[in-house]
Amino acid sequence: DQQVKQNSPSLSVQEGRISILNCDYTNSMFDYFLWYKKYPAEGPTFLISISSIKDKNEDGRFTVFLNKSAKHLSLHIVPSQPGDSAVYFCAASDSNYQLIWGAGTKLIIKP
Amino acid sequence: DAGITQSPRHKVTETGTPVTLRCHQTENHRYMYWYRQDPGHGLRLIHYSYGVKDTDKGEVSDGYSVSRSKTEDFLLTLESATSSQTSVYFCAISEPLGQGNTEAFFGQGTRLTVV
């Protein structure tokens, strides 16, 4: 039973356009949500996060939106760049600080 | 970059042999985790530790054991390696910041092949 779901295994976007990666969750007790980026042969690296008390957090080209009623969050990357090609993982944190992970979405930025 | 070192980075071992992976941190973070990453499954938690000698099971703990005798080191042992344990293993560390707020930092991974 996956508590955090990323339903798109892959996404292809033209360079310069917006990339939107989606994540759904089932546990309404999650307090905190995070996005990580992973390049091949490297460990995941933190990208951006959002607390459950907010609905938007922005950091440069990256914005995360949280819709608690729909139990849905999304990561927007604008404009998309070739270096953004990677696997993106969504994660949620519970009150025990356990991170529950989605399966990841592979983002491919086309030149 | 957070100071996390995993060793070895690559290992090939035979079925039935014990294997130990090491994670070493220099950040003094309280929590340490072992994950495995397999295609289509994302990151699955094997075991985690919330302090010295305090460990607990994750969702895929069968066939694995861990030990944490000091803050810096978290060892993952495959007691008798099987081919299904061929995977990439990641260690992570984190420090709770309150209200569920935590950010995990990952090591570079260990690619384990069981033949």
Image (tube, grey):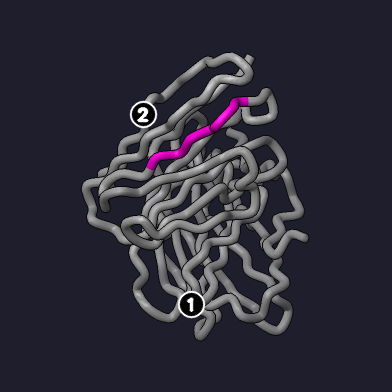
- The number of numbered discs placed on residues in the rendered structure image is 2
Number of other residues with Cα within 10 Å of mark 2, as a class: few under 14, some 14 to 19, many 20 or more: some
Q: Chain of mark 2?
A: B
- Between B22 and A105, the residue placed more toward the observer is B22
Which residue does the image show at 39% across and 53% down from the upper left?
Answer: B32
Q: Position of residue A95 (x, y in %)?
A: 51, 77
Task: Please indicate whether residue A61 sits to the left or right of residue B58 in the image.
Answer: left
Which residue does the image show at 73% across and 44% down from the upper left?
Answer: A9
| Residue extent of the magenta highlight | B75-81
Residue B96 appearing in the image: yes
Which-is-in-front pick, marks 2 and 1?
Answer: 2
A108 w.r.t. B81: above or below = below
> Is A53 a magenta residue?
no
Q: Chain of mark 1?
A: A
> Is B77 a magenta residue?
yes
Image quarter of the C terminus of chain B: top right
